[in-house]
Image (cartoon, rainbow, N blue to C red):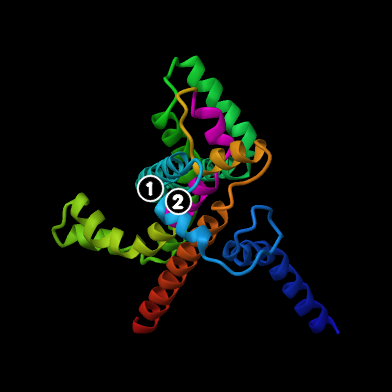
Amino acid sequence: MKKFLAQCYIWILMVLLYAPLVFIAVFSFTEGKVMGRWNGFSTRLYQNLFTGQMQGSSSLIAAVENTLLIALVSAAVSMLLGTIAAIGLHNMSGRGRRALTFLNNIPMINPDVITGVSLFLLFIFLHFTQGYLSVILSHISFGTPYVVLSVLPKLRQMNPNTYEAALDLGATPSQALWKVLIPQLRPGMISGFILAFTMSLDDFAVTFFTRGTIGLETLSTYIYADARKGGLTPELRPLMTLIFLIILVLLLFINVRQAKMQKSE
């Protein structure tokens, strides 16, 4: 009975998590403007999305471009900073290491609204012009801790003498970093990059408070503004479906690749 209840709980949880995604995907193949109203099978929404034949297509395309640009730049910088921070944190010990680990966890458990307001007030205090740069810096601030947590397990799995051996064999510290450490940390770096990228795509509160008044729109702020007008643009349904499928395929590819690498080892 316990096993049956445990399996029921898992299946209920999976349904609650994925039913909305399936619901959006199904209704992306109908022209109904109201979500939940089926008007017959049609791919017109996908055609409108790719051809731009819809109201406000230019603003939606600009929002998608801004979202991808901010996510890619912030995730790349977060991966670099997070990897360096993880290496430094791994080589520390005692209270200093525990204190920095605690500080690294705060941005992840801190509510997004508080983070957004805090960064907004910081930029105002520093007289920093808000726009692309302020949003990217904000996304880096909450994306870097995820990279640190992704890289640290790989550092713990490494042989602690590998780096020292490379130095003893004549490698410079930079050569030992790029040719010895980085190849072994690459899976954790990629996982951290994906986490930072998806967190940036998903963010609304921090972006809303730090984008300024220049009219910068990301996908989340565009959806928020669109919803306040009385309803969502129907073409958002195929867009959300495509984004989910792309991320799903990317995760499957990475997991299969890591499984093959582990088997080969």
Name the residue furthest left. Answer: 170
* Residue 148 seen in the figure: no
**Residues in magenta, as a range:** 192-212
**What residue is drawn where x is 39% and y is 59%?**
190
Question: Are circles 2 and 1 on residues that touch, CB within 8 Å?
Answer: yes
**What residue is drawn where x is 33% and y is 65%?**
184
**For this view, does 183 lie left or right of residue 189?**
left
Q: Is residue 205 magenta?
A: yes
Number of dots carrying numbers: 2
Q: Nearer the viewer, residue 164 or 146?
A: 146
Residue at image mark 1: 72
Relative to 257, residue 183 above or below: above
Amino acid under disc 2: Phe
SS category of the residue bearing label 1:
helix
SS category of the residue bearing label 2:
helix
Residue 155 appears at what percent x and percent y?
Answer: 41, 60
Q: Is residue 240 magenta?
A: no
Amino acid under disc 1: Leu
Q: Earlier in the sequence, mark 2 or mark 1?
A: 1
* Residue 25 seen in the figure: yes
**What residue is drawn where x is 42% and y is 78%?**
259
User: What mark, if any, has residue 24 been given in the picture?
Assistant: none
What secondary structure do most residues of the magenta stretch adopt? helix
- The alpha-carbon separation of the residues under discs 2 and 1 comes to 6 Å
